[in-house]
Each structure stands twice: as structure tokens, then as C-alpha cells.
Amino acid sequence: MRRLFTLTIILSIFIPSLFADEGMWLPILLQKINEKKMQEAGMKITAEDIYSINKSSLKDAVMIFGGGCTGELISGEGLLITNHHCGYGEIQAHSSVDHDYLSDGFWAMSREEELPNPGLTVSFMKSMEDVTSLVLKDVKPSMNQKERDALIRKQIKMITDSLHKQSGLEAVVEKYYYGNQWFAILYQDFKDVRLVGAPPSSIGKFGGDTDNWMWPRHTGDFSLFRIYADKDNKPAVYSKDNVPYKPERFYTISLKGVNEGDFTMVYGYPGRTEEYLPLQAIRMQVDEVNPIRISLRDKRLDIMNRYAAVNDTIRIQYAAKNAGVANGWKKWIGESKGINRMGGVAKKEAFEARFNEWASSQAGSQYKDVLMGFKTLYDPYNYWKRSETYFQEAGLSAEVIRLALRFRALVQMSNQKDSTDAAVKREALKLKSSLDEFYKDYSVAVDRDILVSMLNSYVAAGSSIRIPAYISNLVAKENGESRNVVLEMFNSSFMPYKEKTYEFLDNYKRKRVKKIEKDPFYQFAKAMVDFSITELQPVTGKFNRANDSLMRIYMAGQMEMQSDRNFYPDANFTLRVAYGNVKGYTAADAKNYRYYTTLDGIMEKGDAGAYDYIVDPKLRQLWVNKDYGQFADKTGELRTCFIATNHTTGGNSGSPVLDGEGRLIGVNFDRCWEGTMSDLMYDPTVCRNIALDIRYALFIIDRFAGAGHLLKEMRIEQ
Ligand code: ARG
Ligand code: ASP
């Protein structure tokens, strides 16, 4: 052990790390694994400053924002910053044609004007501890995955129940290294989070989907919210009596800006990476799954865009949905390209050859057959994976089908003998009240066209995938004319129409359940669910169990084989630290990118006059005046975004980008096009995270929006 340790040190001194900049590290292990390297890369503070169990640390100012982003506190009065695209759903929900906060921006000029957001939660991680031995206490190597999973679930329930009881906090147990390690994590949740400010989309979403996943980028991708707590500074549901939360810790903002080579780190919640998968999994993703998703989303986006271009109501209704669909679509295009460009398949092949060689040299090794195991498992599974992808992306993509699924609880209750009439009625009204949000943003015309298009594609793929018999029969009835089928459904159903549905639910009696059961969309939805339960899930479940079991062994094997390498666990939406340096990159032969962009670039793009590059006249005037004040770089420029080598992924959006002293210099929001395959494979030459320069955000708040009062609550240093 000791000998191995010395060898590691010698190796790491003389061989420049092969894996420089790759990695999303566990805050509790920073001191042990990363601190020294981080300091060599330019960090001035200690691991203890970033994460401490004993005192307040930088971790106390970073949070999960909503379901899938990161945010950070920037004032002692609960003010937080995240991305515009992370607050987009909330900004959109407060918007209508009359109050179009998407187009015009929103700025609360006083606390009273801050807007509550039912359903929005932010969570702070309070602590984290290794519970592997507890979780695996009764697990025996001889158990199959099903038995193992059942025992683990039981243990986890016990652990989380007891932690919750002790602390009153949300407790979860998360899996790392594919089940080789387990951590219990405690979170504190806040549910009264109010919208404070958002720039207009022409700033917050500047470049739109044209620039999404791309560099050079000029997006002012930020929005501001405020956490409210009760009078004792404790989390509470929304109440007008709540007061701004006083946090233990918030980030100091630095106006110094960055130079090439500067140390940076990103503290946040990366969602999912899969760096340790076998060759078959990469192939399936790149050759099977991505092409299907891309082509189906091409069609959906075409339809939404066509309507949005000529109809403002629809443009607003579909803004958030469109952005979501487009975001995945574009990333998968980049990911497949990136894997091909870096020869990802050949790299995995070479690695696996080495792995097999190593495994067979280990006497009695459990690793010898693991790669063969994947092959046997994946070959037949590709067919099912394609089927599942179509099911998700075509079968369930019409909104009205997902709406119909929401009637299931009511149907069940109506058919249950032991439920009372009053309870059934209550259920109907509860359903009704949950539908406002749906109808506010629903267009029959868009959804109808999407359903037609998706049915056509679904049926056309029929020979290479399993498709629900219900779908083929439905379309066969009209001689393959999906449009007729769909028109007929929209004619005979009540569900797409708000008034009809509300009238129906207002006067609901249990015998009216027949009407739901006969509804064409309900039948469609039910056929989808049945198909999933009887045909897809059994196969997928079996695959997942076998795969989980192989992955656990394969992961352990990879770690054993490369015992001189520090492994970071794949991302699982738990708190991580990534670090690296500010750095440009070469995207293609002679195509060298500088590490930052400026307001001048916004004007250049704006002059080209494209739809995604609309420049607000007020912003243009500020640019003409060149009055950037304290927000200007020492070069005199107003910088908008910069890139660095931090390893990030979806979920890291909104994450604080910190300098060597732990001060906030940017807000993370994206990655560069050539590096979007980093979820599967990281290439240090082209993988870059994109951050908003914090000075641009402050400039917009102060000079553009005239909300300078917000800067007064921040701690801003030169
Ligand atoms: N690509 C970034 C991320 O994955 C930004 C997404 C913003 N959405 C958009 N459609 N422009 O979240
Ligand atoms: N834009 C992503 C997010 O929303 C970040 C990324 O994928 O790099 O989390």
C-alpha cells in the first residue's frame, strides 16, 4: 500500500497528468485528492474554505435551483443569481401578451414587486457522509441484482428515515461509482423563492438556438431571485409575511476579470455523465439513439417554429417548450459529431483491449468476462432501445396524450367501489385546478400537427422497432392517413378544449367515467401505458439489472487496473467541484478562438440582422456611449462571456464560476460545440465551459435596467 502510494506521487510529479482538467470532484474529498493540484493550478484558498464540516464554507452559498440547475447567493438578504434559461419557466409563467417579461424583461424595483413562484424550490446541501458499509451491510456477492437491489432499498429507507428524524432535513442516499460507493446527503429546502429580475430575452437569450452550445457566445444568461424565510429565518411555504432569508454565507463578487491561464473553478450540480461506459453503450448512443431523437425533434421544431413565426400568442406559449426540445436536439448533434471527431469508438476499443489483457493476467479475476457480458447484453438490446426512443419521442410527444394520462387517477377512483362520491368529486376538481397551467400554454393547432407528424414517423419506423399494435391499427384504419385519424380524434374528444373539459369536470359524477374511458386520447394514452408495461418495461428492467451488475464490476475493475489514477464518480446531480484554467481553443485548422467576447461582438452580430440577434436599442445606446464605468475591463472593453477548461454538464447551468480566491467572476451556462461529447468522453483540447462574465450581468442590472439598488446589497470588490 505504502509503496503504491509513493509510486503515485513520483508518477504525478514527473508525468503531466493525462487527465488534466477532466473531472467533477466530490467536495468532501478535495483535500485528499485535489487540493494540491488546484493550488498548483493557481488556487489561493484551501479545500477547507470550499467545503468544511465544521464551519461555514463556500458550499453554503451554492444551491440546487429548481429541478435541474444550480444557483448561488450573492447577498446577505437572500438574493441569488442563476441563468436566464434556468428561470425561464418562471419568467414565462408570469408572462402574457400584455406583460411580456420574456420580451421586455422584468425588474422588481422594490421587495413588494418581487413575484412568487409556486412549485419552485431551492435546496442547500448541509452534509454528506459515506454510508457504503451500512448500505451494503447484508449484501452478499452471490446475490443476484434483484435481491441486491431489494436489500439496498431497504437499508436506504432505514438510513434516510433515521437521518430525517434526527435532523428534520431532507435525507437521500445516492449511489456513486455504479454502486461501489454510497453517500447519505442532507438538504435544506426553501419553497418561497421570488423572481427579482430578468433581462429581456434579446439579452438573456441573445443568440437563441443559433448560438446555443456554441462559442463565440454573447448571451447575458442570468436571472435574479430571492429566497424568503419565516420570521425565524427558517424555510417556509409562501406567505406574504415571510422575510428575505439571511444566509450564513454568500459570494463576494470580483470585478477584476480574467486573463488567459487564470485559475477557475465551478461549484455546482452536474446532472449526468457517463465516462466509464463500455464501447457498446457509446455505439448505441451515437449510432442508434441520437439519430432517432434528432430527426424526430427536427420535425417537432419545424412545426413549432412555423407557428411561432406568425403568431405571437403561440410564440410565447411555446417559448419554454421549444427551448427545451431544441436544447437536447442540438446537443445530441454535437455529441455524435464530437465522438466521431475524437475517434471515440477507437479509443474505447483500445482501452477495452488493454482491460481484457489486464483482466486475464489477474488470477481468478471477476473482470475477465465483463466486457463479453456487455456484448451479449447490448446486441439484442439495441432493437429495444430504438423502440423505447421512438416510444418516448414520438409516442408520447403530443401534449394532449400527456394530458390524457393525468385523467388516470380520476378514472381509477371512479371505478373503485370503496371511494365515496364526495371524494370522486374532489378528485375531479383537483384535476381541474391543476390544468390552468396546461391550457394557458396550449395550442390545438400546434399539437395536432405534431401528433400527425409523429404518428407518420412512428409508423414508418415500424419494421426496425417494436411499435404498439394500437398505433398501427389506428393508422391502418385510414389507409395510412395519419392526418385523418388525428383530425377525427380532435373532433370527438373534449380534452384539447379548456371550456369543454372544465364543464365536464365541474359537473363530474362517477358514471361520467365512461366518457373519459371512451375518449380517443384517453384510449391512446392507455394503449401507450399498456404497451410500455407489457412490452418495454420487462425488457428494459431486465437489461438495467444485468447492466447495473456488470457496470459495478467493470467500474471496480477500471479503478483497480489504473490504481495510480484518481477517479471521479460520474455525475449524479450531487454537489461537485470542477477546476481548470481560462483558455481559448482551436476548433478546426487555423480556427483559433480567443477566450472572451465583448459587447462589440453583440453589435456585430446584431448588424447581421438575424432573428436571434436582435439588439435592444437601449443596449446599443449604452454601447455607443461606451460608458462602462467600473464594469469595464482594464482594456476598456465590456466583456460578456469567457471560456475555461472546467469539466461541466447539464445541471451546472447557473453554477458559480470562482477565481483562485473563491470570489464570483462568472456564472456558468453552457459548453462549446466541439466539446459537447464531454458527457461521454472528455477531450482537453476542445472541451470548454462557457461562463457569463459577472461584470456584464452587473452592467445590465445597473446601467441597462436601472436596478442599481440591487448592487448595494452585494459585496463587490475590485
Ligand atoms: N445549452 C445550454 C444548456 O444546456 C443552454 C440552454 C438554453 N436553451 C436554449 N434553447 N437556448 O442548458
Ligand atoms: N446548459 C447546461 C445546463 O443547463 C450546461 C451544460 O450542459 O454545459 O445545465
Image (cartoon, rainbow, N blue to C red):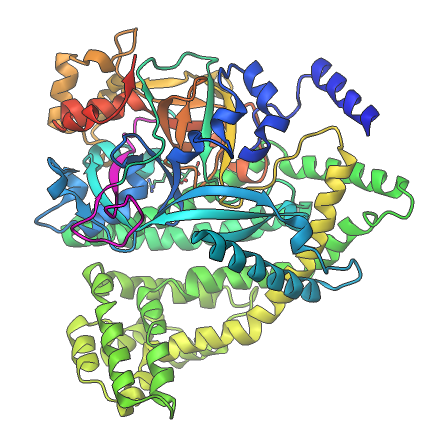
> Residue placed at 90% from the left, 39% from the top?
361
User: In the rendered structure, which segment of residues is drawn in magenta?
Assistant: 217-244
The image quadrant of residue 714 is top left
Relative placement, left or right, of 169 versus 500 is: right
Q: Is residue 239 magenta?
A: yes
Residue 521 or residue 545, whichever sits in front: 545
Residue 478, visible in the rendered structure: no
Magenta residues: mostly which secondary structure?
Answer: loop
Above or below 228: residue 623: above
Image label count = 0
Q: Is residue 599 magenta?
A: no
Q: Picture coordinates of residue 267 (x, y %)? A: 45, 32
Above or below 476: residue 15: above
Relative placement, left or right, of 2 versus 597 is: right
Above or below 253: residue 475: below
Judged from this view, the residue extending furthest toward the left is 98
Above or below 346: residue 545: below
Q: Quadrant of the N terminus?
A: top right
Residue 585 or residue 458, whichever sits in front: 585
Relative placement, left or right, of 717 versus 54 is: left
Q: Picture coordinates of residue 685 (x, y %)? A: 55, 23
Q: Picture coordinates of residue 592 (x, y %)? A: 45, 16
Residue 325, visible in the rendered structure: yes
> Residue placed at 19% from the left, 32% from the top?
614
Quadrant of ligand 2: it is top left
The image quadrant of residue 699 is top left
Q: Picture coordinates of residue 601 (x, y %)? A: 27, 20
Residue 439 or residue 60, whichever sits in front: 60
Q: Quadrant of the C terminus?
A: top left
